[in-house]
Amino acid sequence: MAEAELHPAQGSGELDESLLRAISHPLRHRLLGMLDGRTASPNQLARELDLPLGRVSYHIRLLNDLGAIELVRTEPRRGALEHFYRAVTTVWFSEADWQKLPRSARRGILGQNLQHIFGSVTAAADAGGFDSPSSVVLRAPLELDEQGSGEIAELLRETVERAREIQSRAAERRSNGNGASKVAMELAILHYEHRE
């Protein structure tokens, strides 16, 4: 079970082993995902996750030291500086990198992602987030062989990459004043072996 690919935001090449190990921690993986496409401070993230600030700050420092996130700005807050970060690396693993992780790390990351997806879907459903005509909910039980399963996985990876390209074009339209206001959408794709 891989989540598409983990790419450095700039450049290409193999994923650094220390970065891979760092991101294999479920909380760091979650924090990096929360900083993908937005800027936030450890204080904001700690409140959102209902976790102690010290714990979140520790993991944010690690991600920053490894180059997975970057400091965007600081703001004075009650005699101290609040630091705001954004992701410079996406949180997706390639199939090869996913398999390098211990099973316990894979299951921890998977659990975090599923909790986030189910929580987000439930909150959106309760608040009318599926009322938009562009919202889609599909389920397709399939009987495949190994090759077919691999083909579906590749199709879904391409779909996410294409969605990111569409997002980039929308951001460009907004920055040029040619697009409508920003609409926060979420794309969640699951492809897994059905077991009872």
Image: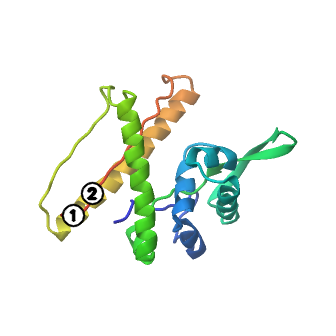
User: Of residues 123 and 28, which is closer to you in this image?
Assistant: 123
User: Residue 147 at what x, y percent from top left?
Assistant: 19, 68
As drawn, the residue found furthest toward the left would be 143
User: Of residues 33 and 159, which is closer to you in this image?
Assistant: 33
Left or right: where does residue 78 sit relative to residue 33?
right
User: Residue 58 at what x, y percent from top left?
Assistant: 69, 61
Count of numbered labels shown in the rendering: 2
Identify the mark at residue 191; answer none if there is no mark. 2
Labels 2 & 1 near each other (Cβ < 8 A):
yes
User: Of residues 86 and 34, which is closer to you in this image?
Assistant: 34
User: Residue 137 at what x, y percent from top left?
Assistant: 26, 39
Identify the mark at residue 149; answer none if there is no mark. 1
Q: Secondary structure at mark 1?
A: helix
Residue 138 seen in this snapshot: yes
| Badge 1: residue crowd in 10 Å (few <14, some 14–19, many ≥20) | some
Left or right: where does residue 4 sit relative to residue 12?
left
The image quadrant that residue 134 belongs to is top left
As drawn, the residue found furthest toward the right would be 79
Q: Amino acid at mark 2?
A: His
Q: Secondary structure at mark 2?
A: loop
The image quadrant that residue 108 belongs to is bottom left
Q: Amino acid at mark 1?
A: Ser
The image quadrant that residue 97 belongs to is bottom left
Residue 93 seen in this snapshot: no
Q: Quadrant of the C terminus?
A: bottom left
Left or right: where does residue 161 sit relative to residue 143?
right
